[in-house]
Image (tube, grey):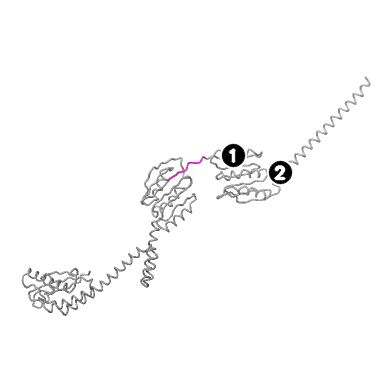
């Protein structure tokens, strides 16, 4: 029994020793864990994550934030290179202590889908969390973003909103024979009225329907309002059509100025335009005819200076031959008319001078010419032969002595005698008109012998051709 106690004492000593050793080990491990945790916490506090915002600006996006280096910024900028939008660098800074390379890789993959499909969208990365905001027009586009975000272990938040697009309106305005007519599908009657009131003479409505599900998302109606007044007044025919997010403007302009104004308006459109406007061929033809007439007038003036050259040009320019002939004929008529006017003036003057000194005398109370009267008629014939285009009236007058019917017959017989005497001298009968007025047109009152002598007369009046 005494032999056992030393062994028991030794065993107790070993147990105590093991217990003490275990406590020291636990204390050491605890201290080591505490130091390690503190070191990790210090490291985490010193290595802050980057943060940035990509938000809509104008027709592109703006980048603001803090990065590790400019290379991270450039990677985001490059990701926009193959999209419809561009990225503008705003307020950014770099700090080598910042981390978070994984989010750069993720956003690089997101940007092409985001820039091409999101409206008024934004990408935010703050407090090591990535947030996506914006509007898309299909659930497929939203699911695509969810798929991209599911490939990362980073905390993410997807605020994408799906707004299914409305169906676009469509319409066509035709012009024919100065009348406008329109058919189409609109959102409401107000859109129709805007177009009707834009045309100075109004628009006839054919097959118009309204549907609240159809929207004018591109401003097609306001743009059509801008071009309708010009189209209505300055285009002879054509149409304005808006369909499938595109305008087709087809028409014939009444002039170059109207065409230029229309093309300027169409160039200002943000909606795709198919421009089929041109000048009306009839206007071009009229301009060509006016130019041809101008050339013909210039040619006529040149021909007046040099007839042979004018005739050669007339032969070479067959296209202007008919018009040139008409112009020359008109000019000739003008010259002939002027010549006849001058001849009439000269003939009138010569006849007046002749009758001023010589009277056409007749036998008393008879229609027979006296020898002196015959000489006067012969001189009158010479004047008429000199001016072959002149027509005259031989007017016979008497005084009031005797019966009125006798005076009328006598005056007519006397002018017929003069007419026949002139015909004998070679004067064409078509140039002569003989009228006896009797006592109806006295020069002076028949109150004296002198006055009666003045009223007994034969007058020669110039009639023209």
Judging depth in this view, the residue of 374 and 349 nearest the camera is 374
- Whether 168 is among the magenta residues is yes
- As drawn, the residue found furthest toward the right would be 3
Label 2 or label 1, whichever comes before in sequence order? 2
Judging depth in this view, the residue of 87 and 440 nearest the camera is 440
Above-or-below relation of 125 to 373: above
- Looking at the picture, how far across and down is residue 75, in whole percent? 65, 48
Above-or-below relation of 150 to 326: above
Q: Provide the residue designation for mark 2.
A: 45
Q: CA distance from mark 2 to mark 1?
A: 35 Å
Magenta region: 164-171
**What residue is at 36 percent from the left and 46 percent from the top?**
204
**SS of the residue under disc 1:** helix
- Looking at the picture, how far across and down is residue 126, in whole percent? 64, 44
- As drawn, the residue found furthest toward the top would be 1
- Whether 371 is among the magenta residues is no
Judging depth in this view, the residue of 271 and 313 nearest the camera is 313
Q: Provide the residue designation for mark 1.
A: 144
Q: Are marks 2 and 1 in contact (CB under 8 Å)?
A: no
Q: How many marks?
A: 2
**SS of the residue under disc 2:** helix
- Looking at the picture, how far across and down is residue 308, in whole percent? 37, 71
- Looking at the picture, how far across and down is residue 443, in whole percent? 13, 74
**How packed is label 2: few (under 14 Cα within 10 Å), some, or many (20 or more)?**
few
């Amino acid at each position: 029994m005494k032999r056992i106690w030393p062994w028991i004492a030794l065993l107790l000593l070993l147990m105590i020793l093991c217990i003490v050793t275990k406590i020291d080990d636990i204390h050491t491990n605890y201290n080591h864990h505490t130091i390690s945790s503190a070191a990790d916490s210090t490291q985490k506090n010193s290595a802050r994550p980057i943060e940035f915002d990509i938000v809509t600006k104008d027709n592109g996006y703006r980048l603001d934030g803090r990065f590790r280096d400019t290379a991270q910024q450039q990677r985001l900028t490059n990701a926009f290179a193959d999209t419809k939008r561009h990225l503008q660098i705003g307020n950014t800074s770099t700090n080598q202590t910042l981390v978070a390379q994984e989010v750069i890789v993720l956003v690089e993959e997101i940007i092409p889908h985001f820039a091409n499909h999101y409206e008024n969208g934004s990408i935010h990365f703050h407090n090591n969390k990535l947030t996506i905001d914006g509007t898309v027009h299909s659930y497929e586009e939203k699911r695509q973003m969810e798929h991209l975000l599911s490939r990362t272990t980073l905390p993410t938040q997807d605020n994408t909103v799906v707004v299914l697009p409305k169906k676009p309106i469509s319409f066509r305005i035709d012009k024919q024979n100065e009348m406008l007519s329109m058919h189409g599908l609109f959102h409401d009657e107000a859109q129709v009225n805007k177009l009707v009131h834009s045309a100075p003479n109004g628009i006839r409505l054919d097959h118009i329907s309204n549907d609240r599900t159809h929207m004018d998302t591109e401003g097609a109606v306001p743009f059509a309002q801008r071009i309708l007044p010009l189209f209505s007044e300055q285009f002879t025919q054509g149409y304005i059509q808006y369909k499938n997010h595109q305008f087709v403007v087809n028409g014939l302009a009444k002039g170059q100025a109207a065409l230029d104004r229309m093309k300027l308006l169409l160039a200002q459109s943000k909606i795709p335009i198919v421009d089929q406007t041109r000048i009306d061929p009839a206007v071009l033809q009229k301009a060509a005819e006016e130019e041809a007439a101008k050339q013909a007038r210039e040619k006529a003036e040149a021909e007046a200076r040099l007839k042979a050259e004018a005739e050669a040009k007339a032969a070479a320019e067959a296209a202007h031959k008919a018009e040139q002939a008409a112009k020359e004929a008109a000019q000739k008529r003008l010259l002939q008319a002027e010549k006849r006017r001058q001849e009439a003036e000269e003939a009138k003057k010569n006849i007046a001078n002749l009758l001023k000194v010589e009277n056409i005398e007749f036998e008393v109370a008879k229609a027979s010419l006296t020898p002196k009267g015959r000489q006067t008629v012969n001189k009158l014939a010479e004047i008429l032969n000199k001016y072959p285009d002149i027509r005259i009236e031989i007017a016979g007058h008497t005084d009031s002595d005797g019966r009125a019917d006798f005076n009328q017959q006598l005056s007519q017989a006397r002018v017929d005698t003069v007419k026949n005497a002139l015909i004998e001298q070679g004067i064409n009968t078509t140039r002569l008109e003989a009228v006896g007025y009797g006592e109806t047109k006295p020069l002076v009152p028949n109150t004296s012998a002198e006055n009666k002598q003045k009223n007994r007369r034969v007058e020669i009046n110039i009639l023209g051709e």
